[in-house]
Amino acid sequence: MKYRCTVCGYIYDPEVGDPDSGIEPGTPFENLPDDWTCPVCGVSKDMFEPLED
């Protein structure tokens, strides 16, 4: 499931991961480190919401 940043609209796609932050493709949102932040605007994980398919 993809997650969207409610601040800037960035979409976290588990199939892509976040290579710039060292997050491998295939990493579910739930498995992101607690200190991971949005790569665009820098807010924490609790500012993301699940996207319905």
Image: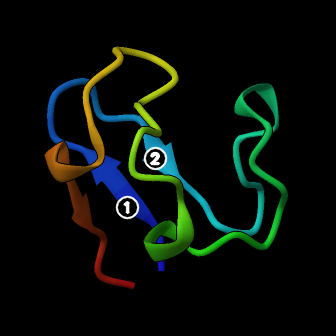
Residue 3's disc is: 1
**To which quarter of the image does residue 49 belong?**
bottom left
Residue that protrudes farthest toward the top in the picture: 41
Foreground of the two, 11 or 43: 43
* Residue name at image x 16 percent, y 44 percent: 47
- 21 left or right, relative to 41: right
Please tell me how crowded label 2 is: few (under 14), some (14-19), or many (20+) other residues with Cα within 10 Å: some
Amino acid residing under circle 2: Ile
Residue 11 got which mark? 2
Which percent across, then down, holds residue 30? 44, 74
Return the disc, 1 or 2, that comes first in the chain's sequence: 1
Please tell me how many numbered marks the rendered image carries: 2
Image coordinates of residue 33 in percent, x first then y, are 51, 53
In which quadrant of the rendered view does residue 16 lie? bottom right
Q: Indicate which disc residue 14 carries.
A: none
Residue 9, image x, y percentages: 30, 34
Mark 1: amino acid: Tyr
In whole angstroms, how far apart are the C-alphas of marks 1 and 2? 6 Å
Give residue 43's position: percent from left, percent from top: 26, 26
State the residue at coordinates (78%, 26%). Answer: 20
Q: Which quadrant would the C terminus be assigned to in this image?
A: bottom left
Q: Secondary structure at mark 2?
A: strand
